[in-house]
Amino acid sequence: MMGENYLFKSQQIVYLSHKNHRLYCEVIQVVESRQLCWVRPLFLVDIAEEMDIYSQLITPKVLMDVRSTSDLLYPITLFNAALDTEVIPILTQLQIESSCEKDNKIARQKLHQFITKIWQNNPEKF
């Protein structure tokens, strides 16, 4: 079951999706033998339904910095490659906002809720 997901490289930005949320992560390593991707979470975005895809990514409704949370080891088939044009504006916004806000407990809770939803909606992949 080799797909384009196995072409992910270290330091590439990928994302997991659930409804209106995306978790952007940096690839640490692809574990092909187990069909897993080891990633470091970067930010969690809540995307407005009514906006087109380009606008959604430039102006997310909620931006949560989750860089201080734990790494994840998730099935590689759940990840999508992120485009530079969607990530760069968010990283810029994240740098501006992260200097003002540093609440690791809330970030961990939000990340935990998100990855639990991913797990619940894809039990066959775990």
Image (spheres, rainbow, N blue to C red):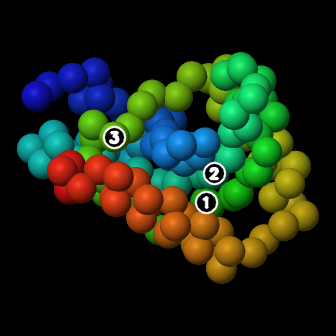
Q: Residues within 10 Å of mark 2 (few under 14, many from 20)?
A: many
> Would you say the residues marked 1 and 2 are in contact, meaning their CB atoms lie under 8 Å apart?
yes
- Give amino acid for label 3: Leu
Residue that appears at 61% across and 60% down: 67
Marks 1 and 2: which is nearer the front? 2
Q: Is residue 71 visible?
A: no
Residue 110 position, x and y percent, is 60, 67
- The secondary structure type at the circle numbered 1 is loop
Q: What separation in Å lies between label 3 and label 1 (alpha carbons)?
A: 20 Å
- The secondary structure type at the circle numbered 3 is helix
- For label 1, the residue is 67
Residue that appears at 36% across and 32% down: 9
- For label 3, the residue is 78
Residue that appears at 72% across and 20% down: 52
Residue that appears at 84% across and 67% down: 101
- Give amino acid for label 2: Phe
Residue 33 position, x and y percent, is 9, 44
- Give amino acid for label 1: Arg
Question: Quick one: label 2 or label 3, which is nearer the N terminus?
Answer: 2
Q: Is residue 113 left or right of residue 49?
A: left
Vertical arrangement, residue 70 with respect to residue 19, above or below: below
